[in-house]
Amino acid sequence: MTKINPANKKYKYQEYADIDTGYQAVRWHEPVIYDLSRKGSCNEIIPEAEEEIQVKVGDVTEKIPKKIRRKRPASLPELSESEVMRHYLRLSQQTFGYDSGVNIGLGTCTMKYSPKLNDQLAKNPSIAYVHPLQPEETFQGLLEIMYELRNWLCELSGMDEFSFQPRGGGHSVYTNACIMRAYHRANGNSHKNEVITCAVSHPCNAGCPSTAGFKVIELHPNKDTGDIGLDQLEAVVSDRTAGLFLTAPYDTGVFDSQLGEYAKLIHSFGGLVSLDQANFNGVMTRMRAGDIGSDLMHFNLHKTFSTPHGSGGPGSGAIGVKKELREYLPVPVLEFDGSQYHLNYNLPRTIGKTGVFYGVVINVLKAYAWIMSMGEQGLREASEWAVINNNYLIKKMLEVRGVEIAWPNRRKLQEARFHLQKMKEETGIGSAEVNLRIADFGVQTYFESHEPVIIPEPVTPEASEGASKEDLDRFVEAFRRISEEAYTNPEIIRTAPHRCAIHQTNIEPLLDPKKTIVTWRVYKKRGLT
Amino acid sequence: MTKINPANKKYKYQEYADIDTGYQAVRWHEPVIYDLSRKGSCNEIIPEAEEEIQVKVGDVTEKIPKKIRRKRPASLPELSESEVMRHYLRLSQQTFGYDSGVNIGLGTCTMKYSPKLNDQLAKNPSIAYVHPLQPEETFQGLLEIMYELRNWLCELSGMDEFSFQPRGGGHSVYTNACIMRAYHRANGNSHKNEVITCAVSHPCNAGCPSTAGFKVIELHPNKDTGDIGLDQLEAVVSDRTAGLFLTAPYDTGVFDSQLGEYAKLIHSFGGLVSLDQANFNGVMTRMRAGDIGSDLMHFNLHKTFSTPHGSGGPGSGAIGVKKELREYLPVPVLEFDGSQYHLNYNLPRTIGKTGVFYGVVINVLKAYAWIMSMGEQGLREASEWAVINNNYLIKKMLEVRGVEIAWPNRRKLQEARFHLQKMKEETGIGSAEVNLRIADFGVQTYFESHEPVIIPEPVTPEASEGASKEDLDRFVEAFRRISEEAYTNPEIIRTAPHRCAIHQTNIEPLLDPKKTIVTWRVYKKRGLT
Amino acid sequence: MKKPFVHRFIPNSAPGVREEMLKVTGYNTVDEIYEEIPEALRFKGELKLPKEPVSEMEVDRRIKHTLSKNRTTQELLSFLGAGCWLHYVPALCVEITSRSEFMTAYAGGDMADHGRYQAMFEYQSMMGDLLAMDVVSAPVYDGTTAVGDAVHIASRATGGREILIPGTISPNTLATIKNYSDPWLELRKVDYDPKTGLMDLEDLKRKLSSKVASVIIENPGYLGFIEEQCEEIAHLAHEVGALLIASVNPVSLGLLAAPGEYGADIACGEGQPLGMTQSCGGATMGILAVNDSDRFLELMPSFMVGITNTSVPGELAFSWHTLWERMLYSTRDHARSFTGTSSWLWGISAAVYMALLGFEGIKQLGKTNMQKTHYAIDILSRIPGIKTPLFSSTHFNEFVINFDGTDKNVAAINKALFEEGILGGKDLSLDFPNLGQSALYCVTEMHQKEDIDRLADVLRKII
Amino acid sequence: MKKPFVHRFIPNSAPGVREEMLKVTGYNTVDEIYEEIPEALRFKGELKLPKEPVSEMEVDRRIKHTLSKNRTTQELLSFLGAGCWLHYVPALCVEITSRSEFMTAYAGGDMADHGRYQAMFEYQSMMGDLLAMDVVSAPVYDGTTAVGDAVHIASRATGGREILIPGTISPNTLATIKNYSDPWLELRKVDYDPKTGLMDLEDLKRKLSSKVASVIIENPGYLGFIEEQCEEIAHLAHEVGALLIASVNPVSLGLLAAPGEYGADIACGEGQPLGMTQSCGGATMGILAVNDSDRFLELMPSFMVGITNTSVPGELAFSWHTLWERMLYSTRDHARSFTGTSSWLWGISAAVYMALLGFEGIKQLGKTNMQKTHYAIDILSRIPGIKTPLFSSTHFNEFVINFDGTDKNVAAINKALFEEGILGGKDLSLDFPNLGQSALYCVTEMHQKEDIDRLADVLRKII
Ligand SMILES: Cc1ncc(COP(=O)(O)O)c(C=O)c1O
Ligand SMILES: Cc1ncc(COP(=O)(O)O)c(C=O)c1O
């Protein structure tokens, strides 16, 4: 049962607008907050110091040496509290969150339901008001949760130790790259300065080792298989190889069938394997990085493990390493002596830190609560459902005129790369255009592809276990209707969106550093050009 | 500076729709939740009893005698958690709350900002998890707050004692009517069974005494002054008069200039005066019911005192009485012995209870926090602003073609009654029609009038201190544009709304008991007729 | 010019705005407008109020400090029920009812506020299904006022003047409906069987007559037992033209027959278990429902959101204008009700609760409650000196413990329990003196086995 | 057929759906699809994980129980700062960041998610005003990684290989940027004046050369004092073509000169004070800004939301595609950054915070912090054996107490304080051994006078 607006079958859209989809986002035409400012409005949120203190110390701000005093007041907007509330309420309503509706489009993002209980627990004063430098014994509860999650992730990954210090996926891969660097140095192998990755791994698998100073060799997937293939790897591996950074499964949805062989090959050259399992969602309980030769790996707690995406973070990375690499982990590492939990800073070979304190502890809590809610059985089912949903989506999407799939010979797990090359040829409408239009149907836009764009006109949705059949049908129905439009009335698509809070955004000036403006103060000076 | 959609001055609405206003509500076309049901979906929110308990007691539900067991399962919808979340999220977005935008239209409702801090405090476990029958000494904190608020309200009203038991304004007036009844009976005056009210007091001033068994005499305001006038009152007062129930100021915005005389007159016949100060917002610190002869009165904490309206409650009434009437109050009454707070049930002449426990304690807390935030100075300023805002609104509204005001000779405090009789005559568009259209402008609809409709085509907005000048201008601008439409293109108005979540609602079947349907089960049986 | 007083809750209080706006009004000062209040009525004295505004942080600090003097049922082990129960509040109920739009909306039009009207229609619908009743109103104030409303409906529908109430009726409900029925009606208690707690049908028959407007039952009874004779009572009432009012606990209806199933004409109850925290009794909602009969529909005193269509074919809509003329706002001097602003937010909470748990969930919840309650009864009944359950009927999640076999009264026992961090059951010795030293205990899904065991251990120790 | 496993987080897990959907896929079982994973790579063992799903109520209960083992800075009197501060969190920050739409959105398109892009542009803009910088990015992970990013920007902009850092740099920041600069850059500490804590300009001059990419300053310094020589340092750095990186506390900027005012080229800082709770250091956001110069704009590693127009004249819009090619996603194997998902939600919190307090509010906040801090310094300095402030410069809201004049070390003192319910300042003896037995104390608006007095009393007692 497709639930696009059932009541509206008989709705005469034409009476009110020329293009209807059964959806319309709210349009507040909300100005930039500066344009809501009223000179002199202010909110007494923070009190002055107590009378006695003021009397005692006087205006100590006068002790600030003149040369370091603020010169000009910042021209922050001035609004009263209710106006701030209204403004951000409206902006929130103009944001299509996971809870708002179908989010299947965002492949590689693993959009799933973030349980509200977990968000509420993370606001509990018993975590919100803990300072990271309190004595360990005063936050054993939190350490227990972190340690338990560590244990569970060790089980799920086959790794021996975890750190939650990284605050995202990129941060994790970077931290792993630092560990790899430290490892080779410690072993006198500073010449090992090349890493190998592939073009259909998340870009951070190239970018993070690069940032850590490695030379990066990027392989492309085989045209026929979608794998990189042992032959390619053999051709580039050498004594200089520090390691291999791969995403599994690839962004294309292909699970490289020779991962095991790659690991052996890399190991035979003294290299390490770092597996990016940010997108673990299709394979929980079905494969473990540690079992197939990974020395390092990471999960994104904000993907597979349900922590909310927060409009773009805070996320949370969890890096797993084999015991040989434990000594290189960022400090502190979690330890349990049978009765007390400890933060051990005493790791002589530690890389030190790649971020402050212990990572996004609130997300550790949320992931912990989520796994507890699921149980092993639930994790297994969730992966199965991600896979079934995705394969259902594939079948349905391929019925849509102009939609094709890359590597149709490969079975796909949690996601797949579609493309619209045919549609583009036949109608001039490609993926970028369709993506302008799709939100008009009350579903989230979709992820096209990371660069390099190996498959032209790419479309990469991902149906996690959070998607229902009705959601999938709705998403496909939107595609079907857009395809119809492409073949009959492409102008609707080219001028889209028509049903969003705003209209087609002109990104051209934002691609030109001369024209780019990212603050109001510059906009006020220069205006748009 | 009128802020209707400034960016949009140059917006070619016609391209996308024929009628634009600079606003469009979200349209999810969200089905009734039953239509989202999926057989067998369920959410494990509550666990089964522990194994040991289950083993020990077995399936005790079998002990329920057959004849009292549920026969048919209730056909509640079955959805998974994220679907419930999505559904109600969407419905919330299709609701225009105070925070959403201009709410000036809702006269007599005193729409103002409800501080978020106060809502958050009311969720503090130290109030959320207090049971009302705990020993007094275990919730002294809460009793302290209630008692302090009692003190403050005594000050503000000039009354001697307060009870928070009533859960709304109507509930308060009713409780006051019960007290009045008990008082006269206790004084051997059971023959005093008439109360006097007036048509421009809130209907509960007639309805509640009626419900309490009084015969109600309803006076009409004088055509010229808007007051009821001593002469009218003298004509109906008698030995049978139990009391006078008036709202001050009236729904019309008129503050009856002879209130003091009325009180004297009523008292001279042995009657009591009960003043409805639900709409206290314009006169805080400027007049006190107790000083002008009221024996009983009430405030709505959910109006003047900022507690959120909750889509229609929970509100909270606070009834104030003079000390002679204290012994009739519902039990328990709050007391303080200098060190401990008590709930005194031992009031021999108490009317007993008109609701459960101690009333809407969470709103007592919120009102307390609000007054604390304001201070006396803030209360006074708030009233002044309500009055200034309203008088500004009056001036601006009267510039709109077809808008007039009742009793123009009277100065208005917190609200005023406008009317569109001229517009109706000249265009056929009256208040009901304009009210269909106004939400299209991104402002809340307005309150027309209580019954009886003494002033035809009434419009009763109320600008509390929460309204900004920009809000007022926006509201008036909407009126101005609708007036323009009325005179040029009234069809737009008659077919409105066009920019809301749904279209013009057909209320005809809901005015006919034969056709009225208020549950899905009946709808499924009968459908709309 | 007055020194500007800028307050965070008053947008216009920014400097300069007052002057600008006053100018438009044509008045020089706001006092000029206030002259409208006759001199003699104006207040000019001093108020004993805190003078100055207080910052948000300081309000937060002070109130948290004051509240911290409270002790809670999270920290103490509580067995209090008696009209306010410790149930689990699903996260979604909190999430949804905290949404600013629902929290702050009020009386907007059908189309502007369509979402909350739909939510309320859904509440009514789901509650109708749970109760097996066709007409449900938006929630009224609380469970006791709902019974009060029911009593009015019944008397107006039948013209009867007597209301028969169970001998075990909740004292809170009784106190409330005493007012509600005055001066229209007379309340008469029907005896109960001292062994089972059930209504004494013989006494009922004796008291039934054509003067009776309705018979009220509570199910589960205030004292926790399941009233199993509902069908018979309905039958007996109907025979004399009286109505049956059933006041029920909504979370019992997964297991117990729904009012509509045994012929109740009016159903009511307290909705607090459906996702509201205890809040010192301050978060309540009255359930009120009648059968779909012209006889009752128009007598409903409270808002009902109806379903209808719109100018666009196929579009459904919801409106609160349903039978407007029956309401206080229209009947005025002939009103028999006073429900205005009531408990809509909690109606939304209840809707979320019912949708989230579904019927199976509510059934399971009932089972969990009963099992834990019976476990408690089972182990407490083994304590020498204690008699429980006092009534032989089946219990849902409350039950009476009689302590006459000990040498302590309930007050003393509760005091001793409290010293161990336990809130004992509600002392019944005032409201039900004939039950001796008895207390009403409540056990729900929130009690762990070890909680119950602890109660037993401590009781054993102290009596 | 498998017995259906229905889970609340898996809508399709309702009975029957699996079969129906599998049929469409053309596979008989999901295992058939999993055959895609080569046999050898498949996991077939046992996992030591909790097997069964757990109900929401039970998760709530267990986790609250575990968390209750923590002690908090609400209950204990805490003087800990050192990178995570106890500031008041305005209710609106919580309200807005709790809104489902902001909490759960992620990577939607410019137009579908317009609201959060606008919010982020507003964050950038307000932060730009506060910093007096023209280019601000969406927040990065935390204050230490922001400095890490800054270091990369500086070296790429200048080609320099050396980074001069203050001798008093935060150990957390130092640890992070050590990694970030490896292998690109060399970190060299500049001496500080042992009396004032300020950077030793002579030493700075000695170390400055054309090899230097940037000079980092912290203001206030990690040890709490205000670095007053910013302008001179900027000048000295610029003279050799190096950049100035200023890492600042945003809530100090009501009083202290903004980085843009003294010529900083890159500004960074930890945004946690702007409406985030301490959360054991788990709620952080890195502030990152540069001046509006072509030189730096394209070197920004993180998302920036730009302002633009739309197809409708007059309409403004916001997009995160800003200079996409500079980002990791595009540069890939030549990347010098790795910021992906970072801390947008906290950016929204910061936006709300800045809009709510306004510049005057932030200034007042700074004053309150300084006054309380100086009050603390004042009364603590009178305690015999204590030397505070250790540095003679003016302090913002942190300061060093030296206990060398007592016979106890910081560890012992903190232990004794803890026994009185006080969390003493961060022990500096490990990170700054040359400061002897010193601790870093933090006093903010959240400390009442009596809190500070209590600290003094207890300290007097225990040392
Ligand atoms: C496979 C993979 N790796 C890494 C990342 C990067 O994660 P983050 O955005 O948290 O840096 C992503 C995020 O999309 C991903 O899908
Ligand atoms: C003057 C006046 N009295 C009484 C009431 C009734 O209040 P409630 O809706 O809480 O019953 C109102 C509400 O609009 C009112 O304005």
Image: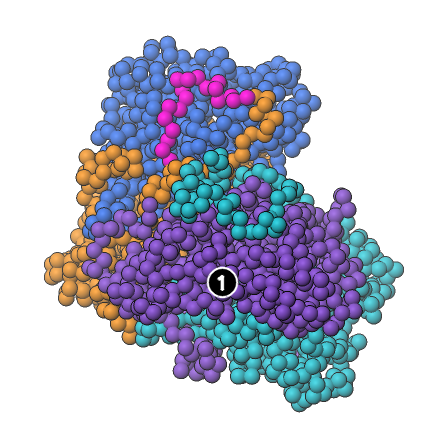
Chain colours: A purple, B orange, C blue, D cyan
Q: As drawn, is C69 to the left or to the right of B511?
A: right
Image quadrant for the C terminus of chain A? bottom left
The image shows residue B435 at horizontal and vertical percentages of 23, 55
Decide which of A491, B72 is in the foreground and name it. Answer: A491
Outermost residue on the front side: it is A231
Q: Mark 1 belongs to which subunit?
A: A
The residue range painted magenta reads B58-76
Q: Amino acid at mark 1?
A: Asp
Circle 1 residues within 10 Å: few <14, some 14–19, many ≥20:
few
Residue drawn at the location 33% of the way across and 48% of the way down: A2
Decide which of B279, C328 is in the foreground and name it. Answer: C328
Residue drawn at the location 25% of the way across and 34% of the way down: B525
**What is the quadrant of residue A230 in the picture?**
bottom right
Q: As drawn, is C428 to the left or to the right of B443?
A: right
Q: Is residue A241 above or below residue C444?
A: below
**What is the quadrant of residue D88 in the picture?**
bottom right
Q: As drawn, is A266 to the left or to the right of C276?
A: right
Residue C88 visible from this viewpoint: yes
Q: Is residue B2 above or below residue B201?
A: below
Magenta-highlighted stretch: main secondary structure? loop
Q: Which residue is mark 1?
A: A224
Outermost residue on the right side: it is D407
Decide which of C303, D374 is in the foreground and name it. Answer: C303
Residue drawn at the location 68% of the way across and 89% of the way down: D240
Residue drawn at the location 67% of the way across and 31% of the way down: C420
